Image: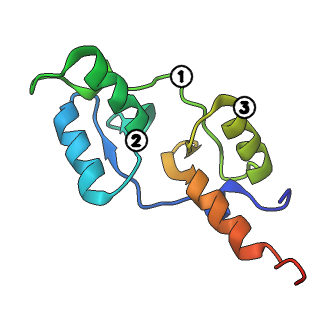
Amino acid sequence: MDDIFAGQLMTTDLYTVSPDTLVEEVAETMLDNEIGSVLVVDGDNQLLGIVTTTDYVGIVAESHPKAETTVERYMSTDVVTATPQDSIRDIADAMIEHGFHHVPVVSEPDGVIGMLTTSDLAGYISHVQTPSPS
């Protein structure tokens, strides 16, 4: 796994929103597309934060958001990111250490270029794992 890098496994079909997007719109996007996270970016595609399905539990429990609530209020801003050259072993270690399921992949100057999820990692391991002897 040390020779497999984020750029090889990351998902590039990203869902991004601006900080002023309403939380209800983000929730609908996540439900409609069966995704677990949405990246919050600025006009230059630079990462500002992330909103995940886990965040929505807190949103609903804390404030019962009204239709005028923007995602900026609830997005996580202390986002751990990876570069396309980072080893998936290092990324997996960080995911376990911090308890997340999504790691945005960023590059300079392009900003957000992909997402690596626990599903991506599990799919890779499942694909390369040799069956155990019977």
Which secondary structure lies at badge 1? loop
Is 19 rendered above or below residue 88? above
Disc on res. 16: none
Residue at x 38% of width, y 39% of height: 53
Q: Residue furthest left?
A: 67
Q: Is 134 left or right of 69, judged from the image as shown?
A: right
Q: At label 2, which amino acid type do we have?
A: Asn
Nearest-to-viewer mark from 3 and 2: 3
Q: Which residue is mark 3?
A: 97
Q: Is 24 left or right of 38, judged from the image as shown?
A: left
Please say if the residues under marks 3 and 1 sit with CB atoms less than 8 Å apart.
no
Disc on res. 78: 1
Which secondary structure lies at badge 3? helix
Where residue 101 sits: x, y (%)?
A: 56, 43
Nearest-to-viewer mark from 3 and 1: 3
Q: Residue furthest right?
A: 133
Which secondary structure lies at badge 2? loop
